[in-house]
Image: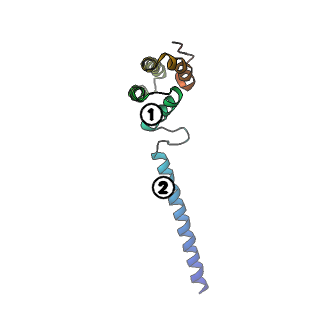
Amino acid sequence: MKTANIFHRLALATLAATLIMSLSLVLNSAANAQGRGGKRGPVNSEVRLNGAMTYWTQQLNLTSEQQTQFRSVLQVHFAKRDSLRGTLRGNRQAMQSQMASVRNTTHASLAQILTPDQQKNFVPLWNKRGGQMNGRNWNN
């Protein structure tokens, strides 16, 4: 009887450990599927776009029309960046050059959407947010 009780407890402990490990794997897979493959892993482009739109809408008080225009420009921006990362992987100099060109084009396109007052706020925010790369600052 005691042997059966020990086996029963051992079976329950094994089942509990298996469930905990399975749950851990499921939760880890779900977290990765939501955009991050680790602390600094890849971010889903839609998550990245939504985050950028939330930031710019709040910081610049974008109108709904401006939001639509901003979203279109940023979608193209992220698509170009992702494409360059894929095609120029291993060629750091070419990637930096092309990324700078994409950033400059995006900056100019976004600035055209804004009112003069919004543009004054946009430049320092763009530089803070990551537009300041390799010592570049946009002052217009």
Residue appearing at x 57%, y 20% in the figure? 124
Answer left or right for 3 relative to 102: right
- Can residue 133 be seen in this snapshot? no
SS type, badge 2: helix
Seen from the viewer's position, the closer of residues 115 and 134 is 115
Residue 59 is marked as none
Q: What is the x, y in percent for residue 23? A: 51, 59
Residue appearing at x 60%, y 79% in the figure? 6
SS type, badge 1: helix
Q: Amino acid at mark 1?
A: Leu
Q: What is the x, y in percent for residue 21? A: 53, 59
Q: What is the x, y in percent for residue 78? A: 42, 29
- Decide which of tag 2 and tag 1 comes sooner along the chain: 2
Crowd tier of the residue under label 2, counting other residues whose Cα lies within 10 Å: few below 14, some 14–19, many 20 or above? few
- Can residue 20 be seen in this snapshot? yes
Q: Amino acid at mark 2?
A: Val
> Which quadrant, please, contains the N terminus?
bottom right
Seen from the viewer's position, the closer of residues 119 and 73 is 119
Which residue carries the number 1 mark? 49
Foreground tag (2 vs 1): 1
Residue 26 is marked as 2
Which residue is outermost to the bottom?
1
Give me the C-alpha separation between circle 2 and circle 1: 26 Å
Seen from the viewer's position, the closer of residues 131 and 93 is 131
